[in-house]
Amino acid sequence: GGTGDVAFRFVEAVGCQERSKSSGQDPVQVTICDINPEMLRVGERRARDRFGASLLDESKALSFIEGNAQDLHQFDDNSFDLYTIAFGLRNVTDVDKALREAQRVLKPGGRYMCLEFSQVPNQYLRAIYDYYSFNVIPSLGQVVANDRESYQYLVESIRKFSNQEELAARMEKAGMESVKYTNLTGGIVAIHEGWKPL
């Protein structure tokens, strides 16, 4: 998303920062798209502090674009090799439309990856996690940020969102193939991935 956490790791992993020191445009292009312009401003400032200006201004390896996951009209069909979204799909009004848009902008053979809060399948761990979520997280939000409501919303939005199997089915319905997911932390978080057919 807008603050760039996932994208920065990718930029570092593929060596964009080193290539930005030479002349010319980088063959690797990382686009950060977010609906919130303030988050994009924070992300761009963080990128400039972390990588310097050449990565954004000269090699064009990293760019920040305001956009809505449900309507990526700024991007042509078949534009991206990889589409990632981290803790954002749950906040999209029309998840299925966002999945179809992700599928549209991916190149044939492109990969979609989604990191999102999910559902804990183990009933004992789920009971502990539910107690923690509904009793501790909102209270911490009140103490730390003086904002119980936002943290209460976070917990409720996680519970209302699709479970692992439901999200996988939605991805398949959007046209993705070889859809699978990996539970992390007992299913509190899951990584879903799928591919656009060739």
Image: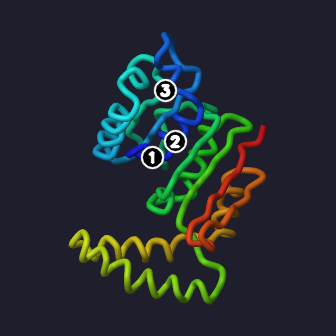
What amino acid is at disc 1?
Asp
- The residue tagged 3 is 17
What amino acid is at disc 3?
Gln
Of the pair 58 and 78, the residue shown nearer to us: 58
How many marks the image carries: the answer is: 3
Q: Residue at x 56, y 31 (%)?
A: 76
x and y, in percent, of residue 133 in the image = 44, 80
- The residue tagged 2 is 9
Q: Do the residues labelled 2 and 1 touch (CB within 8 Å)?
A: yes
In this picture, is 3 found above or below 52?
A: below
Q: What element carries label 2?
A: helix
Q: Identify the residue at the far left of this view.
A: 146
x and y, in percent, of residue 124 in the image = 61, 89
Q: What element carries label 1?
A: helix
Q: Residue 5 carries which label?
A: 1
x and y, in percent, of residue 150 in the image = 31, 70
What amino acid is at disc 2?
Arg
Quarter of the view holding residue 34: top left
